[in-house]
Image (spheres, rainbow, N blue to C red):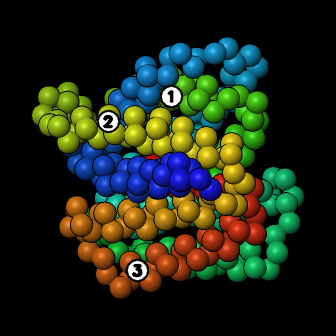
Amino acid sequence: MKPLDWAAAFTVIGLWGFNFVVAKVGVGELPPLLLLALRFTLVAALLVPFLKPLGDAWRPMLVLSVVLGGCHFGLLFVGLSGVDAGPAAIAIQLTVPFSALLAWIVYGETMGGLQILGMIIAFTGVYVLAGEPASAPSLVHFLLVVGGALAWAVANILIKKLRRVPPMVMNAWFALFTAPQLLVVSLVVETGQAEALAAAGWRGWGAVVYTALGASIVAYGLWYWLLGKHDVNRIVPLMLLAPVLAVFLAGGLLGEPITPRILVGGAVTLAGVAMIQFLKPSRTPAIAP
């Protein structure tokens, strides 16, 4: 890889790693689903030039917006309201074993013994992490994050039907379809939106801007650019640094404890994820919210 490629890769790692910290701060200032609705509204507005006709692809795109936008992001951000950012960044990596399992069920892809062992190791690591959210312990919220990982795995199956749609066009339509769904759900299940908007400071609005511009547009734009230049199995291992970075950033910036249990659980989870990923280099892992 050339120096510019390395710079792009580590920029993505930094943007996605820091995104968990920003998201954690954001859900402390704004209701999670409202924050997401604002995020994707901004993404859609910024990507208007990419709103090209979808043709028959609008149906799978609409389904994707429900599964990935409403379920994955919704569960993850609501979960973040009760789980520390570091453990959440590790737990969301369960998308990889979930994806492998669904690929076996839906497409009949074979799984070797080492892949199965990797799944067991990954889930064991997350089990170790499950008791660790320190600021507001909640098994329910942790399970919501795990549910978000499962939703992203389902979305990976759906994305196969949209391979002919250019990445930025997909991002634009995805945001446009997702934003109103999240706003409606926020109005139904959340309260105090007007008060939260009025009281939100630079951190709350900064979270909206960062998650939209930094995590959704810049990071994914660089990610797709790197995937277009290099083999997946050359780029993906670097991306596993993002959740590791998130743990240490959350510890340094948010004061989240970095306990032996977090270190052991995180290492075990990522080891299992790496085993599955490296055996299936065409499958890209979920990295960031």
| Viewport quadrant of the N terminus | bottom right
Q: Residue 31 in the image: state x and y as whole percent.
A: 28, 40
Label 3: which residue? 263
* Amino acid marked by disc 2: Val
Which quadrant of the view contains residue 124?
A: bottom right
Q: Residues within 10 Å of mark 3 (few under 14, many from 20)?
A: some
Residue type, mark 3 in image:
Leu
**In the drawing, does residue 241 fall left or right of residue 156?**
left
Q: How far apart are marks 2 and 1 (CA)?
A: 14 Å
Instruction: Name which of mark 2 and mark 1 comes first in the sequence.
Output: 1
Where is residue 55 drawn, in percent x and y?
Answer: 74, 16
Q: Do the residues labelled 3 and 1 touch (CB within 8 Å)?
A: no
User: Alpha carbon of mark 3 to alpha carbon of mark 2: how far?
Assistant: 30 Å
Query: Which residue: 75% across, 79% down?
Result: 114
The residue sitting at 62% across, 75% down in the picture is: 272
Callout 2: SS: helix
Neighbourhood count class around disc 1 (C-alpha, 10 Å): few under 14, some 14–19, many 20 upward: many
Place of residue 183 in the rendered image (x, y in percent of width and height, measured from the top left)? 39, 28
| Between discs 3 and 1, the one toward the N terminus | 1
Q: Mark 1 points at which residue?
A: 175
Instruction: Report which quarter residue 182 is drawn in.
Output: top left
Q: In the rendered image, which residue does mark 2 sit on? A: 208
Q: Is disc 3 placed on a helix, strand or loop? A: helix
Query: Which residue is rendered at x = 22% and y = 62% of the image?
Result: 254
